[in-house]
């Protein structure tokens, strides 16, 4: 656990970068610092590894004041990743990654073997080990930055806008892989970003900083979206927080039906009986094939003979959120979302009304149940859809 106790940083020119900040970053979890530019996020991060010394208050790691540790020794237990990766341009990728192991005087063979292992872990082909940073894309360089920070297996990782310098698609991939890696490694991570969507996607806890180094709110992402502490936080989160909260409502709570679902070998006559204009056609393995419009069916034969409109995207009932399901429904020609299991087989179909019912019972909607109705378990990593 990293603990900030009334931490203040006032620079000699009078700038207050941190103003009496108290917060806890739990062990094995991701705490994200987010907020306006100049809000003190980077300053707060750097007080943990003593790159910045507070002028008031204390920073503790597992109860011990960081000031009682020598900076070099302290930093060996703390990985540090920055924007643009900050790689050494004249060292190969493997030697960049092995920077700390070399400092720790590991023999070269072991250090390089660790570097290769880590390359695989962060999704880089070890055949790139002998390349130089300029021979890698921005996204690949960021992966090297993460691998380098992990090399000595530090329990703590500080990450300062590590994914900001890459395009949105690569950024999304890096975030997903980062979450997957954290699922295996359980590091104590403090992550700085100015992007609220990134904060909500990655954070177990999100700390919102305001100009002047004031910490305004620390909460789980779903609580931040549900109950912003003040107008600043509400404005910072944005006006679509109602929709974004649905990322934390599990789709498994939505009532699913098998109404108007037919196998491809069913006679077209059966499709004509369907109530509201569309029939979902599935194969013998219950994998969805497409939507058949009942107004334009062939005169005879099977529903599989009909021209099928594409499903668009499905949602996985057990792991996706209502947000993903609603999106699938909105994009579906029939207005209905197709829920599948982990193997892509049909579980059931939900229309927008069914999904609204799930929102209401989860407590996330305006028409929430009375307060004594327990909210559904949130979707883990739910903001990622
Ligand atoms: N050495 C310094 N001397 C004076 N002021 C400083 C110094 N370093 C930082 N500051 C100021 O401290 C405040 C907080 O800076 P910090 O970099 O922590 O903010 P931030 O929230 O990380 O911002 P950004 O999102 O723009 O990176 C800013 O007003 C900055 O100008």
Image (cartoon, rainbow, N blue to C red):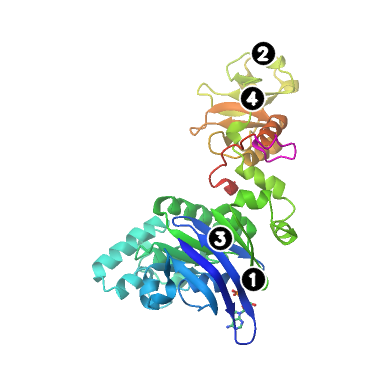
Mark 1, mark 2: which one is toward the viewer?
A: 1
Q: Tell which circle, 4 or 1, labels the residue nearer the N-terminal end.
A: 1
**Residue to which mark 3 is pinned:** 32
Look at the magenta stretch and give its main secondary structure: loop
**Residue to which mark 4 is pinned:** 280
Which numbered marker is on residue 270?
2
At which x and y percent is residue 372?
A: 65, 35
Inspect this view and state whether residue 64 appears.
yes
Residue labelled 1 has its Cβ within 8 Å of some atom of ligand 1: yes
At which x and y percent is residue 338?
A: 62, 31
Along the viewing direction, whichever of 10 and 30 lies nearer the viewer = 10
Real-space CA distance between mark 3 and mark 1, rounded to the nearest whole angstrom = 13 Å
Residue 328 among those drawn in magenta: no
**Residue to which mark 1 is pinned:** 39
Q: Which residues are magenta?
A: 362-372
Please identify the quarter of the rendering in which residue 89 is found.
Answer: bottom left
Real-space CA distance between mark 1 and mark 2, rounded to the nearest whole angstrom = 63 Å
């Amino acid at each position: 656990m990293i603990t900030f106790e009334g931490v203040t940083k006032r620079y000699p020119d009078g700038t207050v970068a941190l103003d009496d900040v108290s917060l806890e970053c739990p062990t094995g979890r991701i705490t994200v610092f987010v907020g306006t530019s100049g809000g003190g996020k980077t300053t707060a991060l750097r007080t943990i590894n003593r790159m910045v010394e507070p002028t008031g208050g204390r920073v503790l790691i597992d109860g011990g004041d960081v000031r009682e540790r020598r900076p070099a020794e302290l930093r060996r237990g703390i990985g540090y990743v920055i924007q643009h990766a900050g790689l050494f341009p004249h060292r190969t990728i493997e030697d960049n990654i092995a920077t700390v192991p070399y400092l720790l005087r590991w023999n070269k063979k072991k250090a390089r073997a660790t570097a290769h292992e880590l390359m695989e872990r962060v999704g880089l082909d070890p055949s790139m080990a002998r390349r130089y940073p300029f021979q890698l894309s921005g996204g690949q360089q960021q992966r090297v930055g993460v691998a380098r920070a992990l090399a000595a297996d530090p329990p703590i990782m500080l990450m300062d806008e590590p994914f900001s310098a890459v395009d949105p698609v690569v950024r999304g991939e890096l975030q997903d892989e980062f979450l997957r890696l954290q699922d295996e490694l359980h590091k104590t991570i403090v992550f700085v970003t100015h992007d609220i969507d990134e904060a909500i996607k990655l954070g177990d806890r999100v700390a919102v900083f305001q100009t002047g180094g004031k910490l305004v709110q620390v909460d789980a992402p779903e609580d931040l979206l549900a109950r912003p502490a003040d107008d600043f936080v509400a404005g910072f989160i944005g006006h679509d927080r109602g929709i974004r909260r649905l990322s934390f409502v599990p789709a498994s709570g939505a009532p699913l039906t098998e109404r108007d679902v037919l196998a491809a070998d069913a006679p077209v006559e059966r499709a004509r009986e369907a109530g509201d204009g569309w029939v979902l056609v599935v194969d013998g393995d219950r994998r969805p094939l497409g939507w058949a419009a009942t107004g334009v069916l062939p005169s005879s034969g099977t529903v599989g003979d009909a021209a099928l409109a594409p499903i668009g995207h499905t949602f996985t009932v057990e792991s996706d959120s209502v947000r993903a399901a609603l999106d699938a429904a909105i994009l579906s020609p029939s207005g209905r979302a197709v829920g599948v299991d982990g193997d892509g087989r049909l579980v059931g179909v939900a229309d927008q009304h069914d999904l609204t019912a799930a929102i209401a019972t989860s407590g996330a909607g305006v028409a929430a149940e009375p307060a004594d109705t327990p909210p559904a378990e949130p979707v883990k990593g739910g903001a990622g859809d």
